[in-house]
Image: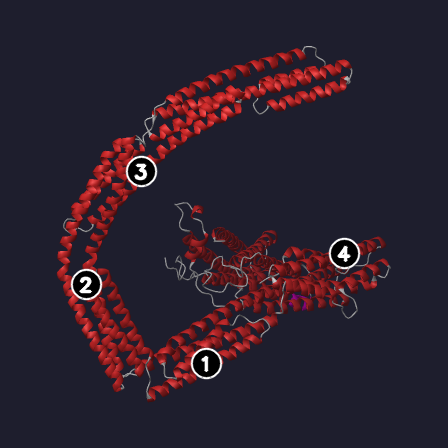
Amino acid sequence: MSRIRPRVLLLLFAAAALAAPAPAQSDTQIQTLAEEQEMLRRRLDTLRQKMTLLAGRLDAEGRTHAADLLRRGLARLDLIDTSGHSLDRAMAKAAGDLRGGTPGSVLEVQERIASDLEQLLSILLDRQDLERLEKELEAYREWLETLEGLTKQEQELRGETQELSRRGASEAEREAREAIEGLRARQAELARQAEETERSLRSLQQAADELDRLVASQGAVLDSIRTAAESGEGAEDPVASTLLARAKVLAEALERARALAREAEAMRRFQDRAEDLSRRGQSGDISPEDLARAGGELAEEARREGEPTRSAPLERAAKALEALAVGDPHAQGQLGDEARSAGERAKEAFDRAGAATQGFRSEAEGAKPSTESGRKASEDAAAAARRAAEALDGRGDLSAAAEAAREATRALERAGRASAGARERTAREEVDLADRAAQVAESLESLSSASGAQEAGRSAESAAGSLREAAQDLSEGDPVAAERPASEALERLRRAREEIEKALEDERRLVRPKEEEIAAEQESLAEEAERLASDLDRRGSEGGLSPSQSSGASSSTREAGSRMREASGATRQGDRPQASASRSAARQALDRALEALGAGRRLQDEALEESQELARRQEEIRKKILELERRIQERANPPNTGGLDRASEAAGDAGEALDRGDVGEAEPLEEDVERYLDQAREEIEREQERYLRLREEELLFKIGDELTRMAEIHAEARARTVEVDRERREAQGLTRAMRLALRRVSRDEESIAVDSARIAEAIEKEGTTVFAFLLRSNEEDLRRIVELLSSRDAPTDERVQGLQEDVAQRIEQLRQALRDEIRRRQQGQGQGGQNFSNPGSRRPPLVNDLAELRMLKMLEEAILARTEGFAERLDLFEEVDPFATEELLRLGHRHHRITELFEEFMRRLGHDPDAPETKPEGEGR
Amino acid sequence: MKTFALLPLSFALGLFVSPEVRSQDEPPIEEDLTRLFHQIREDLRTIDRLLLESGQEGEAAERAANAVEGMRRLLEETRTKQRAVVEGIDEVLRKAPT
């Protein structure tokens, strides 16, 4: 159910409260009221705009119901009533009347506004008329009853169709079915025996195939290990490793020289600019202020330049520039010193890098690595070293030299990685082969009956051990050490394969006689199938079977025979996969033969008439389904009737099949009808549940409205009682006017008593017993009040006022509980509540169990307070008056009802009050 | 009146009550609630009886002053039981699945 969120409604609540009729006010107050009325009008306008926007958005989100509610609300806002005013205009008129000094009519206008706002609120809360909801629910109940009846009729029809089908089969068909089923059972048994016979052989063959693959793989791996061991590839190359370390040092040295060269260059640049600045300052080209600013900027620039390398000389230069900016005479000298030092450091680093480059070049050119990849990398490194040396000698290009050194590093690193990668790959391969060999060993171990298999398993297991050893050596970078276990592994795998071949030969010798038996039996079954096929033809020609039964069943049976012969031949030839496939095809052909017997059944004479009678009944059901669908579709918001649609269609097809006497086809269609009727029932029940929730919520709202009205009438009656009580004490007697006033109180209280009883009766039907009890208690107290006020004395003292207070308290408790329940439902906590109850066991009550228990507690507390009151009076007066005694007895009776309510509550939760300390009924623990 | 199916309390408790809220020495909550329900019910019946007796004693007390003492005693006993019922329901509300 889609509603408008409470936040949207807050404004309306506020508006409704402010729109309440106002008593006579002073001019200032009237002006204030007029302003508030204007403000309300503006807020109403804002609300209208928001509602319009929100409706569009909800439409876009597909929340059409909520959008419709908003549009209905908007229409209500614009509705012109009998006085010719829309809500907006009425508000404007009220404000105008207040300002114009004619507040008399305002009361009437505001009452209308309040009523309009209430109606708007009802629309937005999606409150629906209770009577309409009851009518809807009645319709749903009726539909479900009809559906239940239809489902039952369809079930009966299907039962009778099955019975007719059974009876309708001819003697010839029954015999044919029995023969085909017998053949099928024997074929299935033969297939089972064949599978059983072949199992060990198949497992051995699978192990042999896997060993073939393992031998091939290990052979390839061993070759690569041998190559690596001979060439040294795969092992770590110490010459290449040393060269790599040197190349890294060279690259660093060149990089440092380049950084120092950059630094020296920057220092020279700053020195030049500082000299220029100083000169212009001295010549008066720039003012001392500009000099200071420019010096500061230069210092900042120097710092920025030195920041990436955290250059200390550049930082010192920046400080010198700052000093220069403030006219320090030594600053220029300091800057010059720093620039010189930087130049010297750069030169020194350049020289060292040059020497290192030459040294590395000689080393790379003279290196003799042990591996091919090492040799190739050394050559590349020597070439790079030559390029670096040329860059330095010719142009002093440190960047190019550093890049060349990095190239040398990369070439040597690649060689190292390739070597390690190859080793790791081979090691992983060996581990994988070891796992597969171990699996083969395990599978052979389980074939304890097969001779030779055990030895093969042991060989495979020791091969797995050798493979792991080889993998370990390879991981450690030692292909030479890996060669021995890898070779052993290959040898052991080959041995396992030879042993398994022997085991296979033994097993073949063992199964051969069994297979021969199976082949013979299969051939015999094939002959039987062929004979049966001829028999089916004969039965067809004699009329025992219908032509379609006869031709369908005989051709399928004949095909089964042919497949059986194939299976027999393949078994004898040792072609087990073909034999298995042919056996399977034979079984399927026999299944088809049975289907043909059922589908082609033709009822004769009396049985056909019976079937046509069933067709007529099926047609009646179909019409009823369509009639139900039509009735449902006539409603304003019908539930989904897709299930009924499908059910009527299936019923039509089933009817046609029955009319032809084709009961075999009709049966599954009748099943479909039942299934679709079930779907329709579920769809209708889902929608019914929604209406039940709506109805419960509306009931809660209605009760809330009634309680509010009761509270207002009762509050007025109480106030009048207190007033009369005060007046009679002052007048020392009861005047006629006072009696008249009390009579009015009595009438009002009686009307609340009647309403309380009515509501109590209604909610008792909803299972909300404690709630109803409070209303019954109010009815009782209100009637007692009426009785007292109607007596000759017409007491108005604490006896009546106390009872009135109790009534007021209970009304408030009930209102609070209702508010809580409505809030709980709006917060999406479901209806009724399931705190104590199994959600599937019963429909939850209107007010949830815990709320009822809390109310029981409040009732007990109220009686406790009354008991304490009696005890206090007893202590005070040391005597008992008849009124107190009577009240105490009434209290006892009321308490007994609380006990009964609690017992009822216990039963509702599955506890038997008369069976102490037992677990709840229905518990499976 | 609606027909209420029986409550499989263990289901509700298993679903809603966290085992952490109970110590190992405590009885399972379902047993505890059963005990509480029966205790409350027993107290309620006692209160029924006591209130009835108090009313009857009140009638006697209207005639004889010495009956006041008996009524006072009955009312005291009633209040004690009533407090026990209120506490019992509080305990159920605390322990009940929410």
Q: Is residue A466 left or right of residue A298?
A: left
Assess disc 3: are there few (<14), some (14-19) or many (≥20) residues with their C-alpha within 10 Å of its C-alpha. many
| Label 2 vs 3, first from the N-terminus | 3
Percent from the top left, x then y, of residue A345? 55, 15
Q: What is the span of residues highlighted in magenta in the rendered image?
A: A785-793
Disc 1 to disc 2, C-alpha distance: 56 Å
Out of A553 and A56, give the one closest to the viewer: A553
Camera-near label (1 vs 3) is 3
Distance, label 2 to label 4, CA atoms, is 96 Å
Q: Which residue is mark 1?
A: A621
Q: Secondary structure at mark 2?
A: helix
**Residue A30 is inside the magenta segment:** no
Residue position for label 3: A426
Question: Which kind of residue does numbered mark 4 sit on?
Answer: Arg
Read off the chain for label 2: A
- The residue mark sitting in front, 2 or 4, is 2
Q: Position of residue A384 (x, y in %)?
A: 45, 26
Q: Give the crowd class for mark 1: few <14, some 14-19, many >=20 residues within 10 Å.
A: many
In the picture of the structure, the residue carrying the numbered disc 4 is A42
Task: Point out which mark residue A571 bears.
Answer: 2
Q: Chain of mark 3?
A: A
- Name the amino acid type tagged 3: Thr
Marks 1 and 3 on same chain: yes
SS state under label 4: helix
Q: Please name which of the two marks, 1 or 4, marks the residue nearer to the observer.
A: 1
